[in-house]
Image: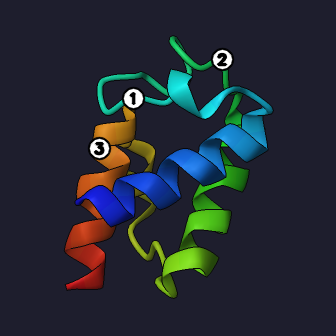
Amino acid sequence: MADVLGKVKQVIAEKLQIDADQVTVEAAIVEDLGADSLEQADILFSLEDEFGITADDTDEAEGLKTVGDIVAYLEKKAS
């Protein structure tokens, strides 16, 4: 999980132009980190490229509210 979390933190921090220390497992993408819907989509697309996966279930992808949710989702898709 540490490697996935590190990459997720890096991508989110870069896309939202925030310090990576703000990106914690418990942080909510919208409420805590200030992302809007366009930024959320951009983050997801960037992570798909980074991990070589495709989010084929948009309902599941829309349910990703926290950094931890994203990490768990990526680990599930990569396995």
Which residue is disc 3 drawn over? Answer: 69
Residue 38 locus on image (x, y percent)? 76, 41
Label 2 vs 3, first from the N-terminus: 2
Mark 1 residue crowding within 10 angstroms, few (<14) / some (14–19) / many (20+): some
Residue drawn at x 36%, y 63% is 4
- Give the colour scheme shown: rainbow
User: On the picture, is 71 further left or further right than 56?
Assistant: left
As helix, strand or loop, the secondary structure at mark 2 comes to loop
User: On the picture, is 1 further left or further right than 27?
Assistant: left
Q: Nearer the viewer, residue 63 or 16?
A: 16
As helix, strand or loop, the secondary structure at mark 3 comes to helix
- Asked whether residue 60 is in view, the answer is no
60 over 48 or under it: above or below: above
Of the two numbered discs 1 and 2 in the rendering, the one whose residue sits closer to the viewer: 1
Residue drawn at x 53%, y 26% is 21
Task: Residue 3: name its quadrant.
Answer: bottom left
Q: Amino acid at mark 1?
A: Thr
Which residue is disc 2 drawn over? Answer: 34
- Quadrant showing the N terminus: bottom left
Which residue is disc 1 drawn over? Answer: 24
Label 1 vs 3, first from the N-terminus: 1
- Asked whether residue 26 is in view, the answer is yes
Residue 18 locus on image (x, y percent)? 72, 27
Residue 58 locus on image (x, y percent)? 45, 60
